[in-house]
Image (cartoon, grey):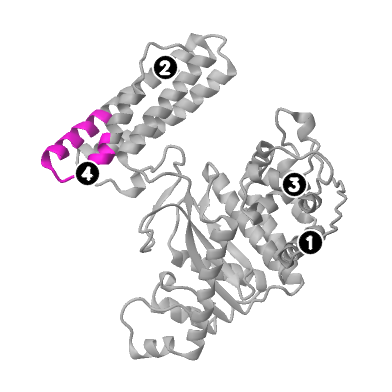
Amino acid sequence: MRLKVKTQQCFFINVFNEPQIVKQVHTKYNRIDRLLQTNPEILTLLHKDLKKYGNLDKKRSSQFSSEQVLRMLIVKCIEQLSYRDLIVRVNESDFLRNFTLIGMGDIMSYAFVSGAAKMICEKTWIKINEILYIAAKKDDLVSAEKLRVDSTVCSSNIHYPTDSSLLWDSYRVLSRLMHQTVLEDFKCSCEYRFHETKIKKLHTFISTSSGRKNNSTKRKVKHTMRLLVERTENLVEKAIKFVNNAKTITNLSRSCLAKCIEIERVILLVQQVTTQARRSQINGETVPAEQRIFSIFEEHAELLKRGKAQKPIEFGHMVTIAQTAEKFITYYSVEAKSRHDTEHKDEVLKDHNRRFGVYPSTFTADKNYYKSMEDVTNWEKKIETFGIAKKGNRTEAETDREHSFEFRNAQRFRAGCEGSISVLKRAFGLDRCFYKGFKSFAASIGCIVFCHNLVNLAGT
């Protein structure tokens, strides 16, 4: 059973004069340490997810407490380190050894920290952020007067998807899984030959020649695409036979059974890839984004068009955040199927009313949250300054409303949300999620919001 708290002191003696930047960093972590100590409910919630976690080396993994794991994850997020770099940084820093409560003891492995992070679910991070908000409200560090909302895209860790690249990914993954299963147990041996090199050449020719306008080249590209689709569909049939034959084998090892289950899961994804490729590239249909998958590794990724000049199309999930005047994030949302911003606007305001008992006196967001002037009028009865500009043409009264002193001040306040999103992307890792699966994707957003709020409170 994992310990909840374990403290091991490290003798940290600095005989040198510290630079100012080092003193600032130490002050920040010391304040975060006090926040964690004064809110033990955070550790209680996290310990429920981690108390049964371990790895193959159970004796060594059980010596690390849940609090040490939490503090390691905080350092990773704040310092923007990979798991390997995290272990090196903490191991070489006496100060961080003290902060993470590892002290003079052994340092945990990067695989252990990574697995522990995957064990913390999204709901746990939501509850942890709620506890931090309650503590900030109790100390009058969060006010209810102002609220601003904005959204951004957190990208999934995938390459730009094309039909040929998805087909190549499908072929190599299926063939690799079958190869690995045969190596696990020779009784699963099949008589199939896999031509990965030839398939890669087909994909390379399509990707390098698809932009050419020569008619003969276009015909060759279409023929090559048809061949690539057919060979991938043929491999799917072989994979289905392979799994069915493997299931008939007696005394099949557990590892082989697990491989077969994985092959069955990948087969469903590959069938969707071949279907959408045949419809779009061979039949000439326009396949909607809702009927496509954009990666067989991160099948949950969405195609999002935000109208950004530098990124017209993004692949990931929409993240909506709401901030008070103190830049404290009181609301965040990430969903497998993103909804329109207008729906989030109503949820944010209701959540603010639930938390503080009143609606904000100033609420602001960009035009994407505009629904109708009737909706604006209804909210202006409850909110003193409702700072959302209208889309399209305006009447004289509507123009006067948007040129008023209060509305302009609200828009200036709204612009600060862009800076906070930039900080979340640059300093906390919101730009790209490297975790696999939507559950881990959503949980990582909760961890980022928690660390952002910790740093925010530590600076007040």
Q: Spot the residue most to the left.
A: 215
Q: Report whether 362 appears left or right of 291.
A: right
- Which is more toward the observer, 453 or 39? 453
Residue that lies at the very extreme toward the front in this rendered image: 16
The three-letter code of the residue at mark 2 reads Phe
How much space separates mark 2 and mark 1, taking CA atoms?
58 Å
Q: Position of residue 243 (x, y in %)?
A: 44, 18
Q: CA distance from mark 4 to mark 1?
A: 60 Å
Residue at 61% over, 76% down: 325
Distance from the alpha carbon under mark 4 to that under mark 3: 58 Å
Q: Which residues are magenta?
A: 205-228
Tell me the number on the disc at residue 92: 3
- Is disc 3 placed on a helix, strand or loop? helix
Answer with mark 4 or mark 3, whichever residue precedes in sequence.
3
Residue type of the residue flagged with mark 1: Asn
Quadrant of image for the N terminus: top right
Going by the numbered disc 4, the residue's amino acid type is Glu
Q: Where in the figure is residue 95, as x and y percent of width and height?
A: 79, 54
- Mark 2 and mark 4 in contact? Answer it, CB < 8 Å: no
Q: Mark 2 highlights which residue?
A: 242
Specify whether 447 is left or right of 188.
right
Residue at mark 2 to residue at mark 3: CA–CA distance: 50 Å
Locate residue 363, reporting x and y percent.
53, 77
